[in-house]
């Protein structure tokens, strides 16, 4: 069953990006994720199955 990942979530990944950051903002979710590195701003499209294997933690901003 797929994880509950929504647009606006911040993913902490197991591996670091070459810039040294390990946190990514979710810009799009579905069969693929569009993620933006919170260190350098680089955007990538990655298949959902591959992304879910590398997720260490999900933080969701609190909405009032």
Image (cartoon, rainbow, N blue to C red):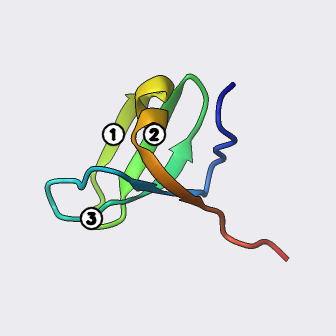
Q: Position of residue 3 (x, y in %)?
A: 65, 37
In this rendering, the answer to whether 44 lies above or below 40 is: above
Per the rendering, the mark at residue 34 is 2
Mark sitting earlier along the chain (3/1): 3
Mark sitting earlier along the chain (2/1): 2
Is residue 31 shown left or right of residue 22?
right
Label 2: state its secondary structure.
strand
* Front of the two marks 3 and 1: 3
Mark sitting earlier along the chain (3/2): 3
Q: Position of residue 40 (x, y in %)?
A: 24, 64
Which residue lies most toward the bottom here?
64
Q: Residues within 10 Å of mark 3 (few under 14, many from 20)?
A: some
The image quarter in which residue 62 lies: bottom right
**Contact between labelled residues 1 and 2, with CB atoms less than 8 Å apart:** yes
Label 1: state its secondary structure.
strand
Which residue lies most toward the right here?
64
Gap in angstroms between the C-alphas marked 2 and 1: 6 Å
Q: Residues within 10 Å of mark 1 (few under 14, many from 20)?
A: few
- Which residue is rendered at x = 65% and y = 63% of the image? 60
Position of the C terminus by quadrant: bottom right
Per the rendering, the mark at residue 3 is none
- Which residue is rendered at x = 40% and y = 28% of the image? 50
Q: Position of residue 45 (x, y in %)?
A: 38, 33
Per the rendering, the mark at residue 21 is 3
Is residue 55 shown left or right of residue 39?
right
């Amino acid at each position: 069953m797929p994880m509950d990942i929504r647009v606006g979530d911040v993913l902490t990944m197991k591996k670091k990006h070459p810039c040294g950051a390990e946190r990514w903002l979710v810009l799009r979710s579905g069969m693929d994720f569009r993620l933006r590195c919170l260190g350098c701003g680089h955007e990538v499209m990655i298949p959902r199955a591959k992304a879910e294997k590398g997720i260490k933690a999900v933080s969701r901003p609190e909405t009032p």
